[in-house]
Amino acid sequence: MGRELALELAKRGCHVALSDIHAENVEATAEKARAFGVKVTAAKLDVADRKAVYDWADEVVREHGKVNLVFNNAGVALAATVEGMNYDDFEWLMNINFWGVVYGTKAFLPYLKASGDGHIVNISSVFGLAGIPSQSAYNASKFAVRGFTESLRVELDMMKCGVSATSIHPGGIKTNIAKAARSDASITALGLNPADATSNFEKAFRTTANQAAKVMLRAVERDSRRAMIGADAFAIDGMVRLLPGAYQSLVAFATTRMK
């Protein structure tokens, strides 16, 4: 999604500053974005490193002069039961999925406010709406991103500072997140096979990254507080609204069907 966001923004004439933990990936995206005639800078960045994120924010402003849009998009996944999950994996995921969003938001917020016209887009998930077996860590991070962003949005509204925020809830998007996921043997207690966990989740991916990027940009244009991406996201959102407690039994049944 990050690559497609960068390219869509460049197509619209936006100068972009890109970062990724994989230098070769971010450089490849930067090269494509430069073809649209905009200024593009790229940096290798670990969003779990608070100092590195703040240093990068300062560098972006030095190179571009100002910041108007921030997309906190980095994310990883982990399949494990609550009981079997080890703390190293849990902290690895939270440092990227949640603290990465916090660092990105706080590092850039003063610059966004200084611009007088800014927007923060934080990527939660459909898993920020409903609890899923084997996904407790991912759920925890994405529920946290949702709460953090919704609280931020209310504060920004009250401040009337020209900056806004949107919480994004994608369903199954065709990206590499599942391929980079960690899977723990503890999920066998749920009747799931760690070796098949990634491929089974990928079967549910229906929306392309480009479609997701366009939905996010439309949400910014409309100043939406929350945006769903994909029919599955709307379905799960509706299910949770209609069956706030009972949905869990439906999720358990659906999970067993993925074996």
Image (spheres, grey):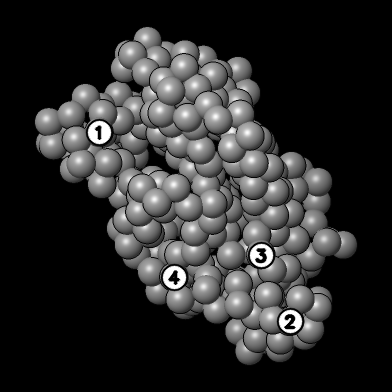
Horizontal side, residue 164 vs residue 49: left or right: left
The mark that comes first in sequence, 1 or 2, is 1
Q: How would you rate the neighbour count of disc 3 (Cα within 10 Å): few for under 14, some for 14-19, many for 20 or more?
A: some
Residue 202, image x, y percentages:
48, 71
Callout 1: helix, strand or loop? loop
The kind of residue tagged 1 is: Cys
Residue at 44% in and 70% down: 230
Instruction: Give the CA separation, mark 2 to mark 4.
Output: 20 Å
- Distance from disc 1 to disc 2, alpha carbons, whole Å, reads 42 Å
- The amino acid marked with disc number 3 is Leu
Residue carrying label 4: 230
The Cα–Cα distance between marks 4 and 3, rounded to whole angstroms, is 14 Å
Res 245 seen here: yes
- Do the residues under discs 2 and 4 have CB atoms within 8 angstroms? no
Question: What residue sits right under mark 3 in the picture?
Answer: 129
Q: Is residue 256 left or right of residue 41?
A: right
Q: Residue furthest right?
A: 83
Q: Is residue 28 visible?
A: no
Q: Nearer the viewer, residue 23 or 140?
A: 140
Residue appearing at x 13%, y 37% in the figure:
36
Give the labeled residue for mark 2: 243
* Callout 1 crowding tier (Cα within 10 Å): few <14, some 14–19, many ≥20: some
**Residue at horizontal 49 percent and vertical 43 percent from the top:** 121
Name the residue tied to disc 1.
14
